[in-house]
Image (cartoon, grey):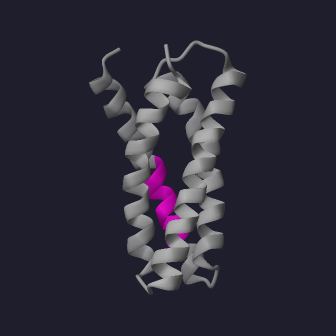
């Protein structure tokens, strides 16, 4: 399968997942949940739901499930730390609007996650 097809599939999974999760994030923060707590919750939900879609549909990976899952969790753990640090810095320290920062982080991390999944997590 070509990288174009994989990128398109990854984008479709990501857009659907992140649209729902971003709405959940905004809802949680609007009801008084802190921005870092809300991000943590929706992040965990997103990781859990996208693993199987990306393994089976996006990358058509037939390798060992457990190995791929460990690599996947490693990638997303690193992404979580990066997301949390950026929120703390840009929102807490510099006063940027959390809605904009979190929206931008979704886009930035998506590109990084695609490359890491293509070439490491679900490598042929």
Which residue is drawn at the image coordinates 60% and 35% (left, top)?
A: 72
Is 90 above or below relative to 13?
below
Question: Most extreme residue toward the right, as rendered?
Answer: 66
Number of numbered discs overlaid on the protein picture: 0
Residue 19 position (above or below residue 97): above
Toward which corner of the image does residue 76 lie, by quadrant?
A: top right
Q: Position of residue 12 (x, y in %)?
A: 37, 39
Give the answer, above or below, for where 53 lies relative to 20: above
Is 23 placed left or right of 12 in the picture? right
Q: Main secondary structure of the magenta part?
A: helix
Q: Which of the 4 image quarters holds residue 5?
A: top left
Q: Residue at x 27, y 26 (%)?
A: 4
**Is residue 72 in the magenta section?**
no
Give 20 or 34, whichever is nearer the viewer: 34
Q: Furthest-left residue in view?
A: 4
* x then y, percent, for residue 103: 40, 65
Q: Position of residue 75 (x, y in %)?
A: 57, 41
**Does the stretch in magenta take in 22?**
yes
Residue at x 52%, y 58% (from the top left corner): 21
> Which quadrant: the N terminus?
top left
**Place of residue 59 in the rendered image (x, y in percent of width and height, measured from the top left):** 46, 22
Residue range in magenta is 17-26
Between 45 and 37, the one nearer to me in the picture? 37
């Amino acid at each position: 399968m070509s990288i174009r097809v994989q990128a398109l599939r990854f984008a479709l999974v990501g857009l659907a997942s992140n649209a729902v999760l971003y709405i959940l994030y905004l809802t949680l923060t609007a009801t008084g949940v802190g921005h870092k707590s809300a991000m943590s919750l929706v992040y965990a939900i997103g990781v859990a739901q996208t693993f199987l879609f990306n393994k089976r549909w996006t990358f058509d990976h037939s390798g060992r499930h457990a190995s791929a899952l460990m690599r996947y969790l490693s990638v997303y753990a690193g992404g979580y730390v990066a997301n949390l640090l950026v929120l703390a810095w840009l929102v807490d320290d510099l006063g940027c609007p959390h809605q904009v920062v979190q929206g931008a982080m979704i886009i930035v991390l998506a590109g990084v996650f695609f490359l890491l999944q293509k070439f490491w997590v679900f490598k042929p």
